[in-house]
Image: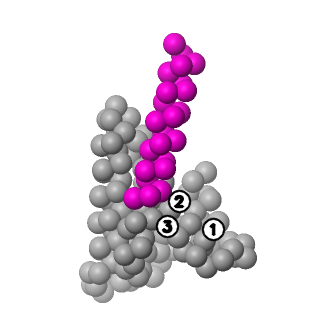
Amino acid sequence: MTIVAGLAVRFAHLGLPFVVVKFGGSALWAVAIYFLSSTVFATWPIRWNVALSGTIGTAIEFLKLYQAPWLDAFRRTLPGIVILGRIFNWRDIAVYWGAIIIAAAVDYWLRGWMDARSG
């Protein structure tokens, strides 16, 4: 659902303000990375998944500064736009970390809720 929401915010022309389209899509992308990490590494402490997800998001943002013909060609495709993006922005890094922390808080709450229901 997170990926669908992120794609809708970015590409569906919903009439949303630019700041919501730009940073909402970035936030949902980071949340998807966190959910992927916390699913693959479900036994890890939440803080480790936060660190991994934030590091991946930050690294991919800095990768935008690297220009190579093959990479620029990929960035012009839909998967390239969605996965890597094209333009470096310091604010995106802050948005990623903020969104990941919020996702981790929701994850923490859900884990506690699920434990309470099963116990």
Q: Earlier in the sequence, mark 1 or mark 3?
A: 1
Which class describes the residues within 10 Å of circle 1: few (<14), some (14-19), or many (20+)?
many
Badge 3 vs badge 2, beta-carbon distance below 8 Å: yes
| Whether residue 97 is situated above or below residue 117 in the rendered picture | below
Residue placed most toward the observer, 111 or 79: 111
Badge 1 vs badge 2, beta-carbon distance below 8 Å: yes
> Which residue, given by chain and number where applicable, does mark 1 sit on?
9
Q: Distance between the residues labelled 3 and 2?
A: 6 Å
The residue segment tinted magenta is 97-119
Provide the major secondary structure of the magenta segment. Answer: helix
> Which residue, given by chain and number where applicable, does mark 3 sit on?
26
Q: Residue at x 40, y 66 (%)?
A: 94
Query: Is the image coloured rainbow, by chain, by secondary structure, or in one colour?
Result: one colour
Place of residue 95 in the rendered image (x, y in percent of width and height, measured from the top left): 45, 65
Q: Give the label on residue 72, or none.
A: none
> Which residue, given by chain and number where applicable, does mark 2 sit on?
28
Position of residue 38 in the picture relative to residue 119 (left or right): left
Q: Quadrant of residue 63?
A: bottom left
